[in-house]
Structures are given as structure tokens and as C-alpha cells.
Amino acid sequence: MEESKKNSATKVFNRIIVALDGSDAAKKALRYAIPIAKKVELPLLSIYVIDLNIYAENIMSDQVSNQMRSILRNEGESVLNNAKKIGDDNGLVIQTRLLQGTPSEEIVNLSDKNDLIVMGSKGKSRLKKVLIGSVSENVLHHAECNVIIVR
């Protein structure tokens, strides 16, 4: 009976996602998600969403737009590579995925295929909300899976 309880407890999640954006809150979310993933022996997928909308890509020249896209891609890859290193340092292989779109929409789109999303309460945006960031709030209200918001 004890073994069946253990198996049912480890079957709660199929995969855990941690949403990263390079902010301190996102780093805390990653550090929060790692022991959960290790405890339930599940893969951890770190995602970074390149949000081109905030840079008004449609009014930039093609050259500037391509440069901005390259800068944002490099930033995302750096954040994800750092997540892999933190995982390695903690004995966990972390999968990564670089996405492009509106962050809250991309995260919510993954929620139907995953069982838990862990993310920081506030991202890198200079626009601050009083208690919780707009991306976190949107994901919390629209995700089809459980969401943990880390402060």
C-alpha cells in the first residue's frame, strides 16, 4: 500500500515548465522548481519567450528589426544556457525551449500539455503592477494546469 501511495504521488505531474525572462524573480522560480522536479523525478522544461511586440517591430527598418531579433535571441539563449548550468550544478538535466510571441500567450499555449508552470511574480518589464506582473497574472487566470507564482 505504501508503494502505491508513492507511485500516485509521483504521477501528479508529467512535466514541469519554468518560465524565464532573465529577471531575479524568474531565477527564484527556477531555484524553486528544481527540487520539485527532482522530488517527483520529472523533466523540467525552461522556456524563454522573445517578445518582439514590445519593440514595435513593424515600424523598424528590416536591418534594425533583424539586429533587434538577433539581440533578443542571444539574450534568450544566454538565459536558457544559464538555466542548464544551474540544473547541472543541482544534478538535474533541464530541457530548454526558445519561443517567440506574446509571453503570456505562449506560456498558456503550453499549459494544456504540461501539469505545472512555475514562474516569477514580476518580470523585467519597467511597467510594474502593484502585486503581480501582468504576464504572471494572465497565465494564472488562463492556464489549463496548476501555476506556482514565486515571489
Image (cartoon, rainbow, N blue to C red):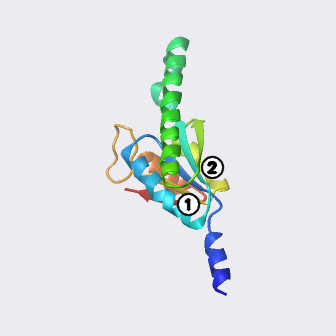
Q: Nearer the viewer, mark 1 or mark 2?
A: 1
SS at mark 1 in the image: helix
Can you say which quadrant of the picture contains the N terminus? Answer: bottom right
Binning the other alpha carbons within 10 Å of mark 1 as few (below 14), some (14 to 19) or many (20 upward) gives many
Q: Which mark is residue 137?
A: none
Q: Quadrant of residue 40?
A: bottom right
Residue placed most toward the observer, 15 or 93: 93
Residue 5: image location, x then y, percent = 63, 81
Q: Quadrant of the C terminus?
A: bottom left
- Of all residues, the one furthest to the bottom in this rendering is 1
Instruction: From the viewer's perspective, tell me whether residue 5 is left or right of residue 133.
Output: right
Where residue 75 appears, as percent x and y from the top left, is 47, 31
- Residue at 55%, 18% in the rendered image: 66
Type of amino acid at the residue the image marks with label 1: Ala
Q: Residue at x 57, y 35 (%)?
A: 101
Q: Nearer the viewer, residue 33 or 21?
A: 33
Which residue is the site of mark 2? 110
The front one of 66 and 5 is: 5
Residue 61 visible in the shown view = no
Callout 2 environment at 10 Å: few (<14), some (14 to 19), or many (20+)?
A: some
**Residue type at the position of mark 2:** Leu
Calculate the distance from the C-alpha at mark 1 to the C-alpha at mark 2: 17 Å
Give percent across and percent down for residue 113: 67, 54
Q: Earlier in the sequence, mark 1 or mark 2?
A: 1
Q: Are marks 1 and 2 in contact (CB under 8 Å)?
A: no
Query: On screen, 17 above or below 23?
Result: below
x and y percentages locating residue 125 in the rendered image:
38, 38
Dot 1 corresponds to which residue? 37
Asked if residue 117 can be seen in this view, the reply is yes
